[in-house]
Image (cartoon, coloured by chain):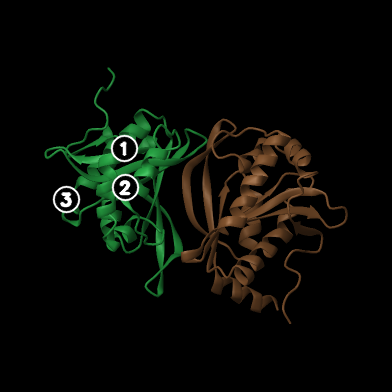
Amino acid sequence: MINDKLFESQDYILTAIDFEKDPEADSAYSLNLRYARYWNDSFIKPLSKNEFKKKYEKIEKKVDETRSVIHFAIRTRVDHLLIGFVRIHIMWNHAVGWLVVSIGNPDYYGKAEHQIIPLALRYAFNELNLFRLEVDVPTFEAELGAILEGNGFKLDAVNRGVIYHDYQYWNEYLYGILRPEWEALQEVNA
Amino acid sequence: MITTVYLVGEKVKLVPFEAERDSKIFARWRNNSEYLRLMDGDIALLFSIENIKKWMEDNENSDKFAFFIIKDKAEDTVIGEIGLSGFQGKHANAWVGISIGDPQNWGKGFGTDAMKVILKYGFGMLNLHHISLTVFEYNQRGVRSYEKAGFKLEGVQRQFLQRDGRRWDMYRMGILKSEWAEQTQ
């Protein structure tokens, strides 16, 4: 039987962007510059509702036209509250994905990732058929690093001082997991 | 005392792109699939001179990149390209990419010298804190060149590439401004 639960975990669901409601929540979350970092390419700054709409349009267009990135909103299962997003950039010719999971709602930060990371892994390996998935984690996001390691990721590289945040330079950890490593863990857990 | 000489090394100098001239040269280099496969992880593709020229023109005046043509200083000929991109937080980190076009110019120290020139530019003029690059497992000539320029191995993206029926590692290398300052003192 094929798995029909790609978009749900015990407490969370992955959905499309809601252009009506999400801009307000995301704009409020982006006042926390830790979250805003994941929506800005160069200067880290909060974004207006309209700026979020433009970001959404841009990413949906890219998903639709190129399939080189996938993007889902993360919501609570109970009341469909937006709490963050999951995104995978894909290099198809090498079957490599670069995963970003960012939780904007502080009540769920460091918690939702426990369920979202396994969901993203299953999507990456069973739906996208990737061979390798990787995640960049600034060292001030230590909780995320621990969750990744708990899900079978290995620390592949330490990029020294590449992130500037809150008056200091931070290392960035590059975590990676290969398909056979993930598959072996599924057998252990089965 | 301020340094006035930038963008010039012992063997090379870095100059701006000239779309009309360089699009033809790039199109010629790209006919060599080995060149393409050493340069990046993209699919080996061939583009028309017009397409390359348009790409160059579209990126003129862009502050997203700092790309240069590498010229052989003695001969004043175009031998490669080098550039910084992917600026993170404007001044924390940037990515460097480089290629020397004709295989006859490989292994002669042009790349190492160009890399030193752009490191000086990135740290001395752009105030970068760190510069990153990736290089493939099968490009040991590249690895040696980057080590000579001062880069350190920061990790291995295990089995990142799929080429010729097998997986290959990709190395992550980087250099801090403090390391650059130390080696150039």
* Secondary structure of residue under mark 2: strand
Do callouts 2 and 1 point to residues on the same chain? yes
Which residue bears the numbered disc 2?
B98
Dot 1: chain letter: B
Q: Which residue is mark 3?
A: B108
Q: Position of residue A94 (x, y in %)?
A: 47, 65
Q: Are marks 3 and 2 in contact (CB under 8 Å)?
A: no
Q: Examine the rendered structure and indicate whether residue A118 appears above or below residue B119.
A: below
Name the colour assigned to chain B in the rendering. Answer: green
- Write down the chain letter for disc 2: B
Q: Quadrant of residue A14?
A: bottom right
The kind of residue tagged 3 is Lys
- To which residue does mark 1 refer? B118
Q: Position of residue B144 (x, y in %)?
A: 27, 54
Q: Nearer the viewer, mark 3 or mark 2?
A: 2
Determine contact: label 3, label 1, CB under 8 Å.
no
Q: Is residue A115 above or below residue B133?
A: below
Residue B137 in sight in this render: yes
- Disc 1 is placed on an element classified as helix
